[in-house]
Image (cartoon, grey):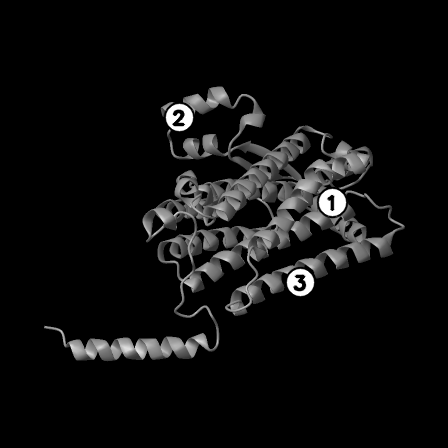
């Protein structure tokens, strides 16, 4: 038989420890109020927990892309951590996991928004090269704003036990989502150069269509969740709204939508640096690699995905630089017409690559 007195002593020590930790932060040994689904279970939020794992799956999906952008891999890793933290948060309602769930959402969202502004404003030549001072200030203001929002939201999570502003997280996270929507539906009409760049070739058109799809899905999921979560705890509305599983839908729509937005950034950043990127069907590729070509789903996808716009999980891979190939071909043709010229292919490639790197670095400066 267990010693009841010893159990009570351990419980007392635990309460004492929690009380001491709560003096430092509200994260220790406290619980959140949960989401609308708690009105149904009064315990673990099963739908929210299960769909949170989809966020982790989207992070793994992003890591399967072939590109050379290190910070994008950091964003993808945040998706993986967010899915795990969200799962534990919705299962236990512990505040510490709620904090990790939130911080791994708004940090990558604001970083991605900053990356997008830099690429669209600077690299797509929306401002002339003579406006270098204007470019510098636009970049500075964007990153200062993003940093303030990240640290303000983080401070609210860490020290918000007594002054937490209701709905601040929703407002803070909505800002980059609205920014993505403005990029998708306002910027192209304000800057014809950017609009033309989205239609310059097949890959550019596909990338832009994937981006718009991601923005629309993200906005719809966010609005659906915010509206239902707001009215859930008003009167008896929650008795009906809880069956919509709005937060679970938010997990799926936001993870998928943001993944397509990240995909467009990968394409845009590489295209601006003269790296040729191409898209292909992820589901078909994974089934082929798994030797499941005879699987019914594979044959169905082959029929449905004849139209590239219908690709559900597009993959992107880095192809040899367009400028690299053109310059190398020109150099070889020139050398072939000259007498007594050694035709050293490896040396040609080294010279071309060095020249391109110098040109790209000068463009960025």
Residue name at image x 72 percent, y 49 percent: 117
Residue beneath disc 2: 297
**Residue situated furthest front in the rendering:** 235
Q: Position of residue 119 (x, y in %)?
A: 72, 47
Residue beneath disc 3: 148
- Residue 19 versus residue 101 in the image, above or below: below
The residue nearer to you, when weighing 78 against 168, is 168
Res. 332 visible in picture = no
Q: Position of residue 258 (x, y in %)?
A: 56, 44
SS at badge 1: helix
Q: CA distance from mark 3 to mark 2?
A: 47 Å
The residue nearer to you, when weighing 298 against 335, is 298
Q: Position of residue 293 (x, y in %)?
A: 39, 26
Residue beneath disc 1: 120
| Quadrant position of the N terminus in the picture | bottom left
Q: Is residue 209 left or right of residue 33?
A: right
Q: Is residue 43 left or right of residue 233?
A: left
SS at badge 2: helix
- Residue 323 versus residue 295 in the image, above or below: below
Residue name at image x 78 percent, y 34 percent: 189
């Amino acid at each position: 038989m267990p010693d009841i007195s010893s159990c009570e002593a351990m419980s007392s020590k635990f309460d004492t420890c929690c009380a001491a930790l709560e003096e430092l932060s509200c994260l220790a040994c406290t619980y959140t109020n949960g989401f609308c689904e708690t009105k149904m279970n009064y315990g673990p939020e099963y739908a929210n927990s299960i769909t949170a794992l989809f966020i982790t799956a989207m992070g793994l999906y992003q890591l399967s892309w072939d590109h050379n952008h290190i910070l994008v891999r950091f964003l993808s890793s945040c998706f993986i951590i967010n899915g795990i933290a969200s799962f534990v948060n919705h299962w236990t309602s512990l505040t510490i996991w709620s904090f990790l769930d939130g911080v791994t959402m708004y940090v990558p969202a604001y970083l991605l928004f900053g990356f997008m502004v830099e690429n669209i404003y600077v690299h797509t030549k929306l401002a002339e090269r003579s406006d270098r001072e204007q470019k510098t200030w636009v970049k500075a203001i964007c990153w200062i704003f993003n940093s303030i929002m990240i640290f303000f939201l983080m401070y609210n999570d860490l020290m918000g036990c007594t002054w937490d502003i209701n709905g601040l997280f929703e407002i803070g996270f909505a800002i980059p989502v609205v920014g993505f929507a403005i990029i998708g539906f306002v910027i192209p009409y304000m800057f014809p150069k950017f609009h033309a760049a989205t239609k310059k070739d097949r890959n550019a058109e596909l990338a832009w269509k994937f981006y718009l799809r991601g923005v629309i899905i993200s906005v719809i999921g966010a609005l659906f969740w915010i509206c239902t979560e707001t009215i859930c705890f008003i009167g008896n509305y929650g008795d009906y709204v809880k069956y919509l599983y709005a937060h679970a839908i938010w997990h799926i729509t936001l993870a998928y939508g943001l993944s397509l937005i990240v995909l467009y950034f990968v394409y845009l950043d590489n295209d601006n640096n003269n790296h040729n990127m191409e898209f292909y069907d992820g589901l078909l590729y994974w089934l082929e690699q798994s030797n499941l070509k005879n699987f019914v789903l594979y044959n169905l996808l082959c029929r449905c995905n004849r139209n590239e716009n219908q690709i559900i999980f597009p993959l992107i891979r880095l192809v040899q630089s367009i400028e690299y190939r053109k310059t190398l071909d020109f150099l070889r043709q020139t050398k072939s017409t000259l007498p007594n010229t050694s035709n050293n292919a490896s040396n040609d490639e080294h010279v071309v690559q060095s020249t391109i790197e110098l040109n790209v670095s000068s463009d960025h400066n």
